[in-house]
Image (cartoon, grey):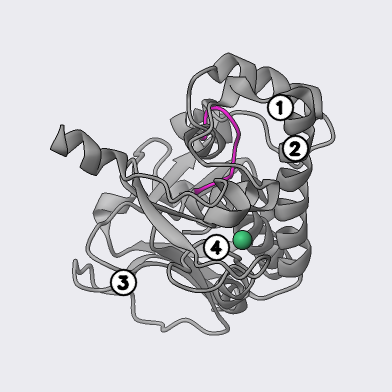
Amino acid sequence: MPELPEVEALALDLKGRLDGHAIARIHVAQFSALKTFDPPLSALEGTLVDDVTRHGKFLDIDASGTHLVLHLARAGWVRWRDEVPTIPPKPSTKSTLALRVVLDDQSGLDVTEAGTRKSLAAYVVRDAHDVPGIASLGPDPLTDDFTVDVLKAILQKEGGKQLKGVLRHQGTIAGIGNAYSDEILHAARMSPFKPAGHLTDDEVQVLYDALRTTLGDAVERSRGLAASELKGEKKSNLAVHGRTGEKCPVCGDTVREVSFADSSLQYCPTCQTGGKPLADRRMSKLLK
Ligand SMILES: [Zn+2]
């Protein structure tokens, strides 16, 4: 799933490609992806693209005041095409193509979604904040006003909730998902199950530094890469996320996995939990 650094890089890449172009046509191939009906999709046709930005994990294409907002979800992606076919795509639930944007010079982009769980979402709105998921976003962790005190206040408010859940909850902090929350906690050498409100001031500072460095470095590495290069870039730089059974690059211990909420998380016992493997809480609940 693309998270803050990838969506930031996607926005930059697309800004360079779309800026100054007009949107000629938009074709929807997966009707379930389009979440709005007013303004209609046709309101974007014939408009000039002014800007492409990011809100949390949402991509926002501003076309003369009408916004096409995309949430790529788990398996969504954007693929640039120097030339799109002149024949409109046929709507099909089997195709990975969800939406095609055709520009005035017949270049364009395909918004795709792999897999069967269709959760990609597209919105046409007059203001990005008309998208409920954007209106409810917490602060962006890479802005100047996201200070260590802001993080401290967030953690105290979340109290007994586990760090892993707090970091990736979009209404609390915007843009961090399953992968970067694992990476941030590994960099901070903290257990994903540590209660947010129990951190000392020093620990808050450590977590803050890990958060800014992990996300900042990922944005730095991703900047200037084309959409097609971003996924590989992300994967090759993850220390623990998605690396169950591999060696921790810091200490050499084996990266472990435990289920968390609707998925699983990865961590290093030596770096993060005093060498002790975490119990699978869903499993232990069942056994009780
Ligand atoms: Zn380690």
Q: Quadrant of residue 240?
A: bottom right
Image position of 218 (left or right of 40): right
The secondary element bearing badge 2 is classed as helix
Residue occupied by mark 4? 240
Image position of 190 (left or right of 111): right
The secondary element bearing badge 4 is classed as loop
Q: Identify the mark nearer the N-term, 3 or 4.
A: 3
The secondary element bearing badge 1 is classed as helix
The amino acid type found where label 2 is placed reads: Tyr
Q: Which of pointers 4 and 2 indicates the residue nearer the eye?
A: 4
| Above or below, comparing residue 185 to residue 11 in the picture | above
The amino acid type found where label 4 is placed reads: Val
Q: Identify the mark nearer the N-term, 1 or 3.
A: 3
Q: Is label 1 in contact with label 4 (beta carbons under 8 Å)?
A: no
Q: Is label 1 in contact with label 2 (beta carbons under 8 Å)?
A: yes
User: Residue 208 got which mark?
Assistant: 2
Residue occupied by mark 3? 96
Q: Residues within 10 Å of mark 3 (few under 14, many from 20)?
A: many
